[in-house]
Amino acid sequence: MYSISKKINIGPQALIAKNFFSNDEIIPAAVTTFTCCDCGHTNTITIRPYESGFPIFQIYSEDKVLSKTELLRNKMVTETSARMIHFGALTVTDLPTLYFGAQCESCHAKYIAVFSYGEKQPGLTVLNISGVWKYEDSE
Ligand SMILES: [Zn+2]
């Protein structure tokens, strides 16, 4: 798991085994797999609340990694509704949204995963993985 700081080009979306987790499923971590688009290897991803990921804001701030338009076009995030705007302009299901970079264990193709985590309503904490996309460095 790593952060991304330079411009990237988004490629195809990888297949993920499970993208929605709630309450006990997230403790101590949400665990799922994605299938590499290039080699078909099944990669495990482990997301630990308050530990895994980096704020999605760092991606679209000054279009540093991806522009807001690119994030929206690839359906990685949606525009945050007005009452949840304190979580940032772009989120997944109006909850605090994070991302991380990961490499295929087998062929080392690069991927970006986007997810949100938080209390959807009292007593219901959810973790929603928007998706895992292959990417290439822009330059
Ligand atoms: Zn691979």
Image: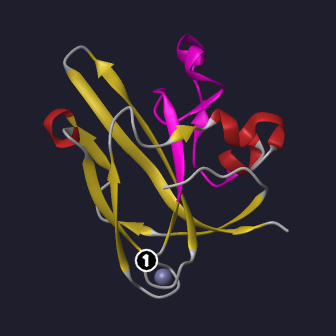
Q: Image quadrant for the C terminus?
A: bottom right
Q: Is residue 51 above or below residue 38?
A: above
Residue at the image point whose x is 77% and y is 54% from the top? 6
Q: How many marks?
A: 1
Magenta range: 73-101
- Find residue 101 and report its horizontal and vertical position in percent: 55, 57
Q: Is residue 99 left or right of residue 50?
A: right
Residue toward you, 104 or 125: 104
Please say which color scheme the image uses.
Answer: secondary structure
Q: State the image quarter where residue 46 is shown.
A: bottom left
Say what secondary structure mark 1 lies in.
Answer: loop
Residue at 19% x, 38% y: name it. 27
- Which amino acid, mark 1? Glu
x%, y% of residue 66? Answer: 75, 49
Residue 121 appears in which quarter of the rendering? top left
What residue do we see at 75% from left, 67% from top? 137
Whether residue 85 is situated above or below residue 23 in the rendered picture: above
Give the side of residue 46 with respect to residue 1, left or right.
left
Residue 100 % position (x, y): 53, 51
- Residue pictured at 30% horizontal, 64% vertical: 17
Q: Nearer the viewer, residue 16 or 58?
A: 58
Label 1 CB sits under 8 Å from any ligand 1 atom: yes
Question: What residue is pinned by disc 1?
Answer: 105
> To which quarter of the image does residue 12 belong?
bottom right
Neighbourhood count class around disc 1 (C-alpha, 10 Å): few under 14, some 14–19, many 20 upward: few
Which one is nearer the viewer's eye here, 89 or 100? 100
Within the magenta stretch, is there residue 30?
Answer: no
Q: Nearer the viewer, residue 122 or 112?
A: 112
Q: Is residue 91 magenta?
A: yes
As drawn, the residue found furthest toward the left would be: 24
